[in-house]
C-alpha cells in the first residue's frame, strides 16, 4: 500500500516546496476526503461507494483524490488507519502489571467503539467487502487487523515474560481466543457486544493461559 | 421462516393428495432448485443471485420456486439447512467420553468442509450477505449458526455433567471461544484453516475449561 496523501510520511518531500497556507489547505482537503469516505461507506456500503461521491461530499475535485490515492480501497484504509492508529495502536494496551484489568479495560473501550454507529457502519462496510474479496481482505488485514492484533500480542508477551502466562502458550492463538469471539458476535451478530461479555471472555481466556 | 417446499414438514399436508410419480418429480425439482441456488450464489454472490437464474439452472419455471419459497434468502437457507442438518446437526458431536478427541475430530471435519470450494463459496456468500444485512443475518443465525453452536453446547454440557468441565464455566461462552477464532480465520482470513490450528485451539480452550 502506498499513499501520497499530504500528511503521510511519503508526502513530506513534496511539502517542503509549499507555502504554509497551501499545506494547511491540503491537510484540510485530506481530512475532508477521509471523513467523507467514512461517512459515505457507512451510508451506501463499499460496493456502491464512488470516488465521485466522496469528492462531492468533501468539496474537492475528484482529481485531487486520484492524485493522492490509487483507489477507493486505499482512501478508506487510510481513513481507518488514521482513526485507529491515533486512538489505539500507538498507545498500545496499558501495562499496569494487572493483565486482567488491562485487557478488560481495552476490550470495554472496543465495545464502546463498535457500538458507536459513526465507527461501526463504515467499519462493517469494509469488513463485509473484505470478507467477499480476498484481495481487499489482504490489505484490510495488513493495514488494520494485523496491527490491531499485534497490540494484544505485545501485551500478552509482556505478561508471559512476567510469568503470568504459561511459557508454552502460543501467544498468537491466545489473541485469537480473545478477539475471535468478539469479532464473531460483531460481524455475524451471534450475541450482544457488552462489557459483561468482554469481561467474562477475559476471565475465561485467562484461566487457560495461566501457568499450571 | 416458513417454507412450503415439498419434503419439508409444512408441505406434508399437500403431498397426501399427490400421486407417487408427482411426488418424485416434485422432490427432484426441489433438489435441483436447492443445488442450483448453492452453485449460483458461490459463482455470483448473494446480491447478484436471482430467482430467474436459479430457475434456469434447475430447469424449472420461476413460478415453481415462488410457489415454494417467498424469497431467494429462503431458498438458500433451506439449501444450507438441508446439507448441514443431514451431515452434522442431527448426528451431533460424537460423545466417546474423550472430550478432547471428540472436539478435535469434529473441528477437523469442519476444516475439511470449509476448505472445500463447493461448500465454502456459497456459505461465504451467505455469511457476507448476513454481515451486511441485519434482517438476513437474523434468519441465517436462527436457521444455521445457532443450531450449529447448539451442537457444541450439548457436547460441552455433557462433559460438564461428567465433571470434565468446571461447574462455573458458561457453556455458551466456551462454545464462542472454540468457534469464534475459527470463524474469524475463515471470514476475515486472519490465518489458515488447518487441522493443526483446530487441534491447538481445542488444547488451549480446554485448559481454561478444566476443573481447577
Image (cartoon, coloured by chain):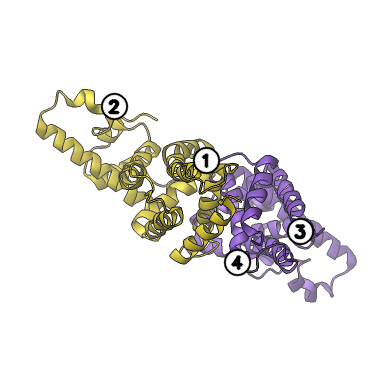
Chain colours: A yellow, B purple
Q: Secondary structure at mark 1?
A: loop
Q: Residues within 10 Å of mark 3 (few under 14, many from 20)?
A: many
Cα–Cα gap, marks 4 and 1: 35 Å
For image coordinates 29% across by 47% down, the residue present is A36
* Residue, disc 2: A10
Mark in front: 2 vs 3: 3
How far apart marks 2 and 4 lie (CA) works out to 50 Å
Residues under labels 4 and 3: Cα distance?
19 Å
In the image, residue B46 sits, relative to residue B95, either above or below, namely: above
Report the disc number at residue B93.
3
**Marks 2 and 3: CB-CB under 8 Å?**
no
Q: Find disc 1 in the rendering and name its residue.
A: A133
Q: A9 or A178, which lies in front?
A: A178
- Front in this rendered view, residue B29 or A170: A170
Q: Which mark is residue B204?
A: none
Question: Mark 4 falls within which chain?
Answer: B
Amino acid at each position: 500500500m502506498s499513499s501520497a496523501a499530504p500528511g503521510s510520511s511519503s508526502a513530506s518531500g513534496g511539502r517542503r516546496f509549499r507555502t504554509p497556507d497551501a499545506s494547511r489547505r491540503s491537510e484540510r482537503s485530506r481530512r475532508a476526503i477521509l471523513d467523507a469516505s467514512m461517512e459515505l461507506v457507512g451510508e451506501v456500503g463499499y460496493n456502491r461507494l464512488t470516488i465521485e461521491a466522496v469528492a462531492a461530499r468533501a468539496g474537492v475535485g475528484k482529481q485531487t483524490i486520484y492524485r493522492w490515492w490509487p483507489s477507493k480501497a486505499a482512501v478508506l484504509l487510510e481513513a481507518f488507519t488514521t482513526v485507529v492508529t491515533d486512538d489505539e495502536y500507538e498507545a498500545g494496551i496499558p501495562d499496569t502489571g494487572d493483565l486482567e484489568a488491562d485487557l478488560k479495560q481495552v476490550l470495554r473501550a472496543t465495545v464502546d467503539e463498535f457500538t458507536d454507529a459513526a465507527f461501526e457502519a463504515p467499519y462493517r462496510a469494509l469488513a463485509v467487502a473484505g470478507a467477499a474479496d480476498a484481495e481487499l481482505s489482504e490489505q484490510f488485514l495488513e493495514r488494520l487487523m494485523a496491527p490491531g492484533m499485534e497490540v494484544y500480542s505485545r501485551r500478552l508477551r509482556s505478561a508471559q515474560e512476567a510469568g503470568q502466562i504459561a511459557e508454552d502458550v502460543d501467544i498468537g492463538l491466545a489473541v485469537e481466543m480473545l478477539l475471535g469471539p468478539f469479532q464473531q458476535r460483531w460481524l455475524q451478530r451471534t450475541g450482544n457486544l457488552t462489557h459483561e461479555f468482554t469481561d467474562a471472555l477475559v476471565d475465561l481466556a485467562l484461566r487457560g493461559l495461566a501457568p499450571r
